Amino acid sequence: MVTVVKCPSCGKDVRWTPENRFRPFCSERCKQIDLGAWAAEKYKIGGTDEEPPTDDASGEQRSH
């Protein structure tokens, strides 16, 4: 039995087989659209844009 997933870009059914070199995408076009969205920062991984905490109260980071 072959696993079928939805293309993340267009929603088309995609067979999850070794022959499908673009999986989980249905085509190179959908793969490139997704890559372009990441490059344009349309997707973000959770977290904050704040600076990492410093080692001391003066705000300067120490080198070890």
Image (cartoon, rainbow, N blue to C red):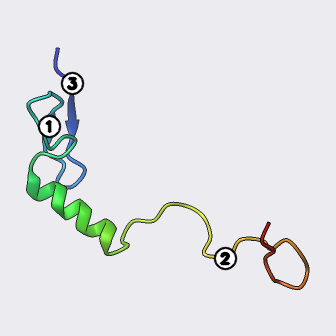
* Residue at left offset 18%, top offset 63%: 33
| Left or right: where 44 falls relative to 4 | right
Q: Amino acid at mark 1?
A: Val
> Sequence-wise, which precedes: disc 1 or disc 2?
1
Residue furthest bottom as drawn: 58
Q: Which residue is mark 3?
A: 3
In the picture, the quarter occupied by the N terminus is: top left
Q: Which residue is mark 1?
A: 14
Q: Amino acid at mark 3?
A: Thr
| Mark seen at residue 50 | 2
Percent position (x, y) of residue 17? 14, 27
Would you call the spot at circle 3 few (<14 residues within 10 Å), some (14-19), or many (20 or more)? few
* Residue at left offset 83%, top offset 83%: 59
> Sequence-wise, which precedes: disc 1 or disc 3?
3
Would you call the spot at circle 2 few (<14 residues within 10 Å), some (14-19), or many (20 or more)? few
> Sequence-wise, which precedes: disc 2 or disc 3?
3
- Above or below, 64 relative to 51: above
| Left or right: where 18 falls relative to 39 | left
